[in-house]
Image (cartoon, grey):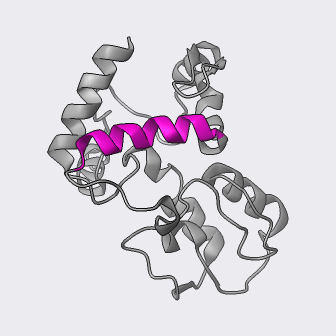
Amino acid sequence: FCTPCLQQCLKPKKPVCGVCRSSLSSGSRALDLEKQIETTETTCNGCNKKMFLSKMRSHAASCSKYQNYIMEGVKAVTQEPLHNSRNFPNRFTFPCPYCSEKNLDQEGLVEHCKALHSMDAKQVVCPICASMPWGDPNYRSANFMEHLQRRHRFSYDTFVVGDYDADEDDMMAQVLMRSLRDK
């Protein structure tokens, strides 16, 4: 959901789900959905390792075979061949802007900073935002911890696959074709 659409769902006195329109309670978690994600098994399309859906995002961030699988799909829909992969910023793992610990996926960075740097008031550049095409690598967040909580509660890779400049319609057609082929 984009923010304006989500805000419309939450605006009424009785907020509703944007998908099924059922009532939402403020602060309540979808425990049945969490349980389903934690107990549903899936297979990585890169390395064929079996795991629960709840572990897939962090696995995908570190599985080079999965990243190659995604890039193959991107190559299939782009008009020109992809440039050398060294020209693309790493959007899978990030360093901590406080202590420079490396190879944290987005969720790992959020958890790491909450656990070790929640009281650090130093202004830092968000490594996640800086890696995005629209991100300013020089912008220092006044309150990085609040920024993480507000802006990075979800991963951009949930919504954007591989090449941020690929044609959206071609990418959607490719995703649909691959979903039919893979299952």
State left or right for residue 42 relative to residue 78: right
Q: Please give the name of the residue rendered at 79% of the width and 74% of the height, measured from the top-left corner.
A: 119
The mark total stands at 0
Q: Along the line of sight, which residue is nearer the eye, 141 or 99?
A: 99
Q: Residue at x 65, y 52 (%)?
A: 105
Residue under the point 24% across and 42% down: 77
Residue closest to the far left: 169
Residue 9 position in % (x across, y down)? 27, 43
Q: Position of residue 76 (x, y in %)?
A: 28, 39
Residues shaded magenta: 63-78
Note whether 118 is above or below 93 in the view shown.
Answer: below
- Mark yes or no: residue 20 visible: no
Residue 112 relative to residue 37: left or right? right
- Which image quadrant for residue 95? bottom right
Q: Is residue 22 magenta?
A: no
Quadrant location, the C terminus: top left
Residue at image x 49%, y 62%? 151
Instruction: Specify the principal SS of the magenta part.
Output: helix
**Vertical relation: 146 (above or below) 164:** below
Q: Position of residue 28 (x, y in %)?
A: 54, 35
Residue 65 lies in the magenta-colored region: yes
Task: From the viewer's perspective, tell me whether residue 98 is left or right of residue 30.
Answer: right
Residue 68 drawn at (x, y percent): 51, 40
